[in-house]
Amino acid sequence: MARTVDTGKAGGKAAGKPAAGQIAAKARSKVRTSGVRAEALAVAATLPVAMTGRASPAKAKDGDAPVFAYIRSLPQPQRGIAERVDALAARTLPGLQRSVKWGMAWYGVGDGWCFSCGGFAGHVKLTFGRGTSLTPVPPVTPIGMGKDSRGVNLASVADLDERQAASWMKQATAIPGFGKKKR
C-alpha cells in the first residue's frame, strides 16, 4: 500500500498514514479476494444486535414470557443452546425466577439475580455473577460484567456440560444475588 509523507506544508498527509481512498480500496480488495471474509461480513450484517457483542434491544422485564420471547428471537444454534440452558435451570432450581435485564435472560431464586444466558455471534454466554465463588471457577472471564463474573461460552448444545452447569446454578443461587428489588 502506498504511504504518503509529511511535507511540512499545509495540506500534507501525516507521516506514514495511508490516504482515506487507499484504505477504502484495500478494504474492497479484501472483500473481493476473500470469500470467507465477505461471507463473515454478510453474516454479521444480518445478525440481531444482541449477536454482535452489544446489548440486545430486548426490554427489561421480569417474568417467564419476556425470557421465552428473548430466547425465541435468537437464531440457531444460539436459540437451541439457550433453550437447553433454560430447561436445565427449570429442572435444577425450584422457585426459579426469570427476567430480561441488560439485554439478556437472567435467572435467580429468592432475592436477586445469579446467572445469565445471552446470545452472541458464534456462541451463547452462560455467566455467573459471583462466578469466582463457584467450585470449580468457570473458565471464562466475560468482558464488562464485573470482576467476580465467570462463565462459559457455548458454541453448540454439545458444549453444555449439564452436570457441571447444574452444579454451578445450585451454588450460584446459594450466594446472595444482585439487583434485588426494592420493597
Image (tube, rainbow, N blue to C red):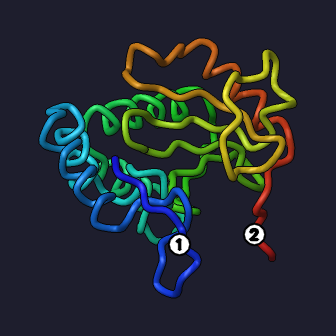
Q: Nearer the viewer, residue 182 or 165?
A: 165
Percent x, y for residue 71? 36, 48
Give me the C-alpha separation between circle 2 and circle 1.
63 Å
Percent x, y for residue 110? 75, 50
In-image side of 25 versus 158 (left or right): left
Q: Earlier in the sequence, mark 2 or mark 1?
A: 1
Q: Is residue 102 above or below residue 104?
A: below
Q: Secondary structure at mark 2?
A: loop
Percent x, y for residue 31? 19, 44
Which residue has dot 1 on it? 7
Q: Amino acid at mark 2?
A: Lys
Question: Label for residue 148?
Answer: none
* Residue 56 in which image quadrant: bottom left
Q: Residue at x 69, y 19 (%)?
A: 167
- Asked if disc 2 and disc 1 are in contact, CB closer than 8 Å, the reply is no
Q: Nearer the viewer, residue 138 or 162?
A: 138
Q: Residue at x 35, y 51 (%)?
A: 2
* Residue 173 in which image quadrant: top right
Percent x, y for residue 65? 39, 59
In-image side of 65 versus 175 (left or right): left
Q: Residue at x 82, y 18 (%)?
A: 135
Which residue has dot 2 on it? 181
In-image side of 11 versus 145 (left or right): left
